[in-house]
Amino acid sequence: MTNKVDLYVNGEFSQGSGTETISVTNPANQEVLAEVACATLEDVDVAVAAAKAAFYEWRLIPAPERARMLMKYQMLLKEKQDEIATVLAKETGKTFADAQGDVWRGIEVAEQACNVPAMMMGETSENVARGIDTYSLIQPLGVCVGITPFNFPAMIPLWMFPLSIACGNTFILKPSEQDPMTPTLLVELFYQCGFPKNILQLIHGGADQVNALLNHEDTRAVSFVGSVGVGQHVYRTATQNLKRVQCMTGAKNHMIIMPDADKAQTISALVGSSVGAAGQRCMAISVAVFVGEAQSWIPDVAEAMAKIRPGAWDDEGAGYGPQISAQAKERIEGYIEKGKAEGATCMLDGSGCEVEGFPDGNWVGPTLFSDVTTEMSIYTDEIFGPVLVGVSADTLDEAIQVINANPYGNGTSIFTSSGGAARKFQSEIEVGQVGINIPIPVPLPFFSFTGWKNSFYGDQHAYGKQAIRFYTETKTITARWFSSESTVNDNLTIALK
Ligand code: NAD
């Protein structure tokens, strides 16, 4: 019997009021793992109403008590991390090590949410005028919404709902329909930790369910992670509806390779960060900028990439897994063809890749292009596969100009042994997350995830202090208390000051 993936709406896990389902398939062999129930628009309305009603009670629970429940949750996630990683590996195709990383990076954010009493402290200023004090309270917003992509089905939902709920909000999660089993397990575990019902609702589906949440008058804030086109639509619709929004979107991340870098370390980092996780990471390096003499390293990069092979999630020798869907594989192979037609040199071609025992998997082998120009579509577009494009620059200044002219600004990195070059790079580069001899500089959760330009629309970023501001309102109180010593004259003086 096929597994069924439930919604959580109005206090219970169920298949909802509709009949439409979406198949969840194993990307290594197309086996149907489960059928996920799509929420009807009526289910969305019921979920929002239940979350709104639950908010008025949840916001009154003291922050230390909310944090204590979250402590239980992060402990349970740690206990169950391999179980979660197994579900995740099967539905995404990620290698088990990558799946464990996905779960762990989410747990780190849930841990950070336990610190909410300190993070929600306001400010106080005594005697701002005679006998008058001003202080601020940090209060939750109401019903918040999270819309998440396929590529990190544990980490990205965990960027959102633990922090939002810790702040006293209620939350509606709409995860990717391509791998909904992991987020559903996260919600099931959540309700094993003593949280009151309805503070977290789970809606499955696609564009219709997202649009219903964006257009609902009772949702206050929207966190979105996904592709740039959908992110722009979400940002425009939600802001049009006067909601608070943060959209973490697509990327084209460059690594500058200086000729003075440690060659072996650099090539190893470049290969891992470009084809690791099948290139399906928003912080993957997809462009290598070889500066000066470093251009002669390109054949060595091709040789190192050729040694990496994809395989199934439990194949310990596999460097990465399949692409999430047959459409994704087809799209990537389309770009490989375009790259050749546009005149780039294909040093390593991963199209038509086969993996023994898995003839129907969505495999794409490691792919490397050199002689790429910034007009080619393999440079301008996010390919989201194990495809690395190499461009050349004569100087560091020229390499910085290439990156700054690119419309995306999620992550970038420089490999060099020169402190001066690294310092110039960190100062002049127009990208929000910068690595120095680190290929994928994803900040830990006490910082925030700070993409720039077309990789982010909004104001406050995901997790860290910025997320607390995103999920709360500041109320500023100005107070005066009369005492027996106060006189009419004192009051007059105060009013005139
Ligand atoms: P996607 O945009 O296709 O889907 C994201 C979410 O939006 C899903 O929940 C999906 O159901 C929903 N959706 C899809 N089409 C929609 C529409 N027309 N209207 C409303 N909602 C819609 O993204 P994906 O393919 O699942 O994820 C990969 C993308 O996510 C890549 O572009 C990657 O760079 C990006 N990403 C960005 C970050 C970041 O932090 N910047 C992190 C991870 C992934």
Image (cartoon, rainbow, N blue to C red):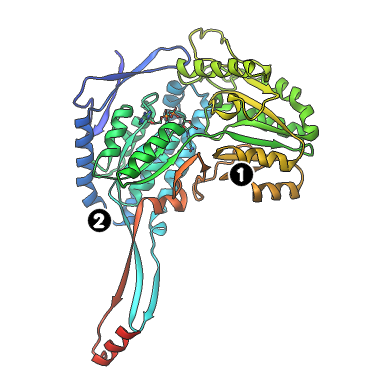
Along the line of sight, the residue nearer the viewer: 491 or 73: 491
Q: Quadrant of ligand 1?
A: top left
2 or 1: mark nearer the eye: 1
Q: Report x, y in % for residue 379.
A: 60, 28
Q: Nearer the viewer, residue 483 or 459?
A: 459
**Secondary structure of the residue carrying numbered label 1:** strand
Name the residue that disc number 1 marks.
434
- View extreme (front): residue: 375
Residue 287 visible in this rendered orientation of the protein: yes
Task: Please determine whether, in this image, residue 242 is positioned above or below residue 300.
Answer: below
Whichever of callouts 2 and 1 sits on the residue coming sooner in the sequence is 2
Name the residue nearer the viewer: 13 or 205: 205
Find out if the beta carbon at label 2 lies less than 8 Å from the nearest ligand 1 atom.
no
Q: Amino acid at mark 1?
A: Val
As drawn, is 366 to the left or to the right of 87?
right
- Is ligand 1 within 8 Å of the beta carbon of the residue shown at mark 1? no
Circle 2 sits on which residue?
60
Dividing the image into 4 quarters, which one contains the N terminus?
A: top left
Residue 127 is drawn in which quadrant? bottom left
Instruction: Say which of 497 and 29 sits in front.
Output: 497
Q: Position of residue 124 (x, y in %)?
A: 39, 71
Quadrant of the frame with the C terminus: bottom left
Note whether 474 is above or below 417 in the view shown.
below
- Give the residue type that dot 2 points to: Leu
Note whether 390 is above or below 213 in the view shown: above
**Residue 352: mark in rendering:** none
Instruction: Find numbered disc 2 in the image and state the secondary structure of the residue it sits on.
Output: loop
